Image (tube, grey):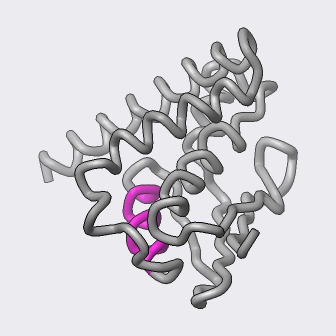
Amino acid sequence: MEKDIMVKRLATRVVFTSVGLGAALTKAAGIQALIDTQHKLVDALLQPESDKLRGKGLKVYPSIIGPTAHALGIPLTFHTVTDERIESSTSKCAYYEAAKQLGLADTPLCEGLCKAVSESLLKLIAPGYSKRIVKSLWRGDDECRFEITKR
């Protein structure tokens, strides 16, 4: 139980730090600067596992992103998972909730946080695939909805 509390506290810190720094970078240098920074960060984090993950295919995406998102407070539901397409959604985004608490909800960070992380993972496990944000809580939608398809 104590370990779960520690993980949750760490995840909360990661989310708030990501939102705070992400919003500052986006306001100072634009969303592309945040996207580029996230790609570098995630690429570095994935490096130790890259040989195990490289070319595993689209179907392993939920087994990696699902638990990671859940730990960060983003409960994802995967509606479609095939070799060619993934559709997923969530009605709760910890990044968005943190942004609201920090007074930063006016700086949409979907592209720079959520999409950039997925794109880095996809580049490794399923090159040629891309994530598209269909709906977003940041944009005023009732949920975040994503689809991953071949570019």
Q: At 65% from the left edge and 86% from the top edge, which residue is drawn? A: 84
Residue 68 inside the magenta-drawn segment: yes
Give the residue at x 53% y 39%: 39
Is the magenta region chiefly helix, strand or loop? helix
Farthest-out residue, right: 140
- Tell me the magenta residue range: 60-70
Task: Please check the rendered image and state whether residue 71 is part of the magenta-colored stretch, yes or no.
Answer: no
Asked where in the image residue 133 lies, by quadrant, the reply is: bottom right
Q: In this view, does 51 lie to the left or right of 77?
A: left
Residue positioned most to the left: 2
Where in the figure is residue 43, as x and y percent of width and height?
A: 42, 44
Q: Looking at the picture, how far across and down is residue 116, in whole percent?
A: 61, 45
Residue 10 position in % (x across, y down): 30, 35
Rendered residue at 76%/68% (across/down): 151
Look at the picture and state if 52 lies above or below 69: below
Residue at left offset 40%, top offset 77%: 56
Q: Is residue 105 above or below residue 75?
A: above
